[in-house]
Amino acid sequence: MEANRIVSRWPLVGRNEELRRFAMAQADEHCRGFVIFGPQGVGKSRLAEECLARAVKNGMKHERVTASAAASAVPLGAIAHLIPSSVDFSDPAQGFAAVAASLAGPKRCRWTLLVDDLHLLDASSAVLLRHLIDAGVVWLIGTVREGEQTGEAVSALCKGDTVHRIDLGPFTEEDVERLLAAALGGPVGRRTVSNLHTIAGGNVLYLQELVLGALKSDLLTSQGLIWELTDGRLPASPQLTDLITTRIAAVDPVARPVLDLLALCAPLPLEDCRSISSLETLAGLETAGLIKVTTDRRRTSLALAHPLYGELLRARISASRKQELLLAQAERTKAWGARRRDDLLHIATWRLAATGTANSDLLMRAASIARHAHDYKRVVALLRALPTGTHTSRSLLLLGESLFEQGDPDTAEQVLLEAGALAETDDEKLDVGFARMMSLFWAAGRTDAALTVNATVKNQLTSPDHQRMLKIAEGAMRSICGQPVKALVLLDALDSDPLQAPNISIWLMGAMMKPAALALTGRADQAVLSAQASYTLHKKLNDQALLLPPIGHLVSLVLAQAEAGCLNEARETGRRAWSRLPEIHDPVSWIWMAYHQAHVEWLAGHPATARRWYAESAAQARTYRNHRGLRLALSGLAACAAIQGDVAAAQAYHEEALAYPPMGYRNGEEHIGEAWLYAAQGRLAEARAVLIAAAHDAGATGQLASEFLLLTDVARLGGSHEVINRLRELASTCEGKLAVARFEFVSALAAENPQRLLAAADNLEAVGADLLAAEAASTAARMWNRSARPRNATAATNRASRLLDRCEAARTPLVANLTAATPLTRREREVAQLAARGATSRSIAATLHLSVSTVDNHLQSAYIKLGVTARQELAPALSSYMVMVESFSPFPEP
């Protein structure tokens, strides 16, 4: 995709509220203008252009004015093109009136005038514009850069009840995600969104130029799933580089040392910056928007206002100057006593960057701090700088863990084997053994090898408490490799106090995985309580002292809440987790949070949103070469594409999924994509056969939640009688509102009872399963239609249509032929539409040249066909009817 073409259609996203307020301002007969305030780069001009386009669309004449410093030196210079040459301003009042008369013309037209950079207008132009606004000749759209000096005349132009003011702030991360997806034509990875938002600082201009530079450098790419930034420096476009260069070039030379220091070492305490610069200089840099000052309790810190400033400054610092600044700052921090926890990490990093070496003890202590902060890249850099022969079991353990977290399990295994050879105590052997198990299990996908390590290390340990930790570690692995029943037996070794455990990381891993085992075996309500309790307990601990971040518990909580039928709560838990993005340091949490977020949306029947999250999970798995969950994610992608009618994509995802082995987790669900692909191709019997076999596998491994899901899909594809007895058994065993609602749905399908189907639709909608609810209502409509009960049929059809509106163009066999039970005639539709707008029978009769009785007869017929009983119900019923008559599905009816 050509970069320039993408940027040329850069969309206006995230400004709906401002556009709504613009529409309200235009509709207000007393309003004469709309002025947009905000800092540079937040999209003031883009929003103003959109406002102008909407005004023009409404039939208003228009003109543009671009104010500038050069034009402001000439009275009326900016708006000279609006002034007839014959106007004489020797008498200002008569001159202003003549300009107003010329613009209005004989038809008394009103112009929409867009003035960009209104703050740069000269006083004469501002006074004339105020006169034209007050005369009703001009309706103003203006932009004003925040913090700029404006004259009294310009200030008066923007004030008063007749001019509506809005203030634009920087874009939020959610705004950036929507904007990028619209511009690039597809979903964008969350880490990419976060990086671009952070670097651009919410500045839309910077964001656009960053995206342009990344596209041209092939650093922002899509492999068919999701747009992601590849590793490497993020280049700015030449335009952005020129813009930033201009800003920095204007800085007084006396301020350059502190800017260079911040580019290399920020954030820095105020005291450090004052040692090389005056308070006046620092205040000037803050006023100019080049640095930002933050205060946390008693500490005041300084940093560059935008990361892009640092990129440009660092590129211009010579090697010798860089070394001088880094070493000086290291000494400065040491002189202050290096009292803060991360001071040693900074000192080691600066010395390493300056000279390529540092004291071995300092490197080791810094690496430990970086590991607890989950800064794996820095751990590797620090420990690889240790001199040959100085490594210990502890240093090799830290290095191996960090290599695993960075997606390099092969090198991690080599390093951890060396660490094991040096391990002497039970604590050291347990630590190294657990790190090997996690790397082999999660990153390398070698379950048997990980379990072998567990057994080997257990035989090497002498302490029963340490052996109990390995029992918990084994239970954690078996929870998600297809043996949840056995896992729960092993996880009974978890006690209530993690602080008493010989290895707190193993305890926490077991606590994270236990809710998954509970949910998979049908104990969803218990799983929710377990996940909430372990998360709360983890948060009470000192986060920085733990190797596992608490975010992992939220992954388990999303899973548990979804299986319990609390889909809205699960979605909100996911949002809470993603809002804490900096805490998701390891790829495992990232991959599985995205997968479970996708699963929530699949259960809800929202295929487009689910597809986005499955793509995120698969893309991160590829990036970090962590193939554990790839088959599940690709199967989910195939299923979503199939029910969206994208059969070619579904086929491609399914074929790719076959290249990866199943991991045992959610056993059987790796076949969902295959089954829904067959369904989309009209091969319903084959789809049911695949699902029945998959459900048998799930049940054989005790994963009752997956078995329930797969058998429900069999019923949705026409096999309710085949699965009803087994589902009845599962419903008596599995906890949660979702299990109950799904069983009621399948039971009503098997009984062919439309009344029970509508009751099932109520319960499914209550838990958030919108697509299943739509299927229940749609099936009820067909049954009533066959029973010649058109009013009931249409009411159910309307209900199904309203539910289906939430389902992101999903189409399945049970809603494939969702149409009005009895179509409206052209005349019935005309009469119903007028009545829905509030017209009386008499006025409708006059409009359509009919008798009042004929109108009433048409209305009565429309009521029956639409399933309503009163005029106030007509509008939503007609809306649903129009959706139905325009719908299409590739699926056959089961």
Image (tube, grey):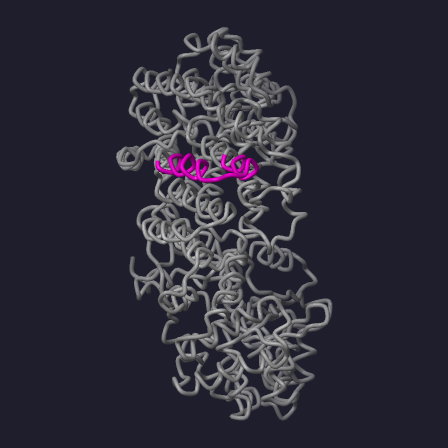
> Is residue 258 visible from the viewing direction of this image?
yes
Report the front residue among 169 and 32.
169
Residue 705: % across, % down = 49, 23
Question: Is residue 318 shown above or below 419?
Answer: below
Viewer-proximal residue among 786 and 667: 667
Residue 741's quadrant in the figure? top right
Question: Residue visible at 62% across and 39% down?
Answer: 534
Left or right: residue 688 versus residue 588 is left
Magenta stretch? Answer: 449-470
Q: Is residue 463 magenta?
A: yes
Residue at 67%, 65% in the rendered image: 164
Most prominent secondary structure in the magenta stretch? helix
Of the 4 image quadrants, the one containing the C terminus is top left
Count of picture labels: 0
Task: Tell me where residue 201 appears, x and y as whole percent.
Answer: 53, 67
Residue 98 in view here: no
Q: Which of 601 and 428 is in front in this view?
A: 428
Quarter that holds the N terminus: bottom left
> Is 758 on the left-hand or right-hand side of 196?
right
Q: Quadrant of residue 652?
A: top left
Residue 429 is one of the magenta-drawn residues:
no
User: Where residue 402 sits in the image (x, y, percent)?
Assistant: 43, 55
Location of residue 225 in the rendering, given as x and y in whole percent from the top left corner? 35, 46
Observer-nearest of 140 and 265: 265
Q: Is residue 412 above or below residue 782?
A: below
Note whether 670 is above or below 534 in the view shown. Answer: above
Which residue sits at x=61%, y=70%? 37
Vertical side of 375 occupied by 707: above or below? above
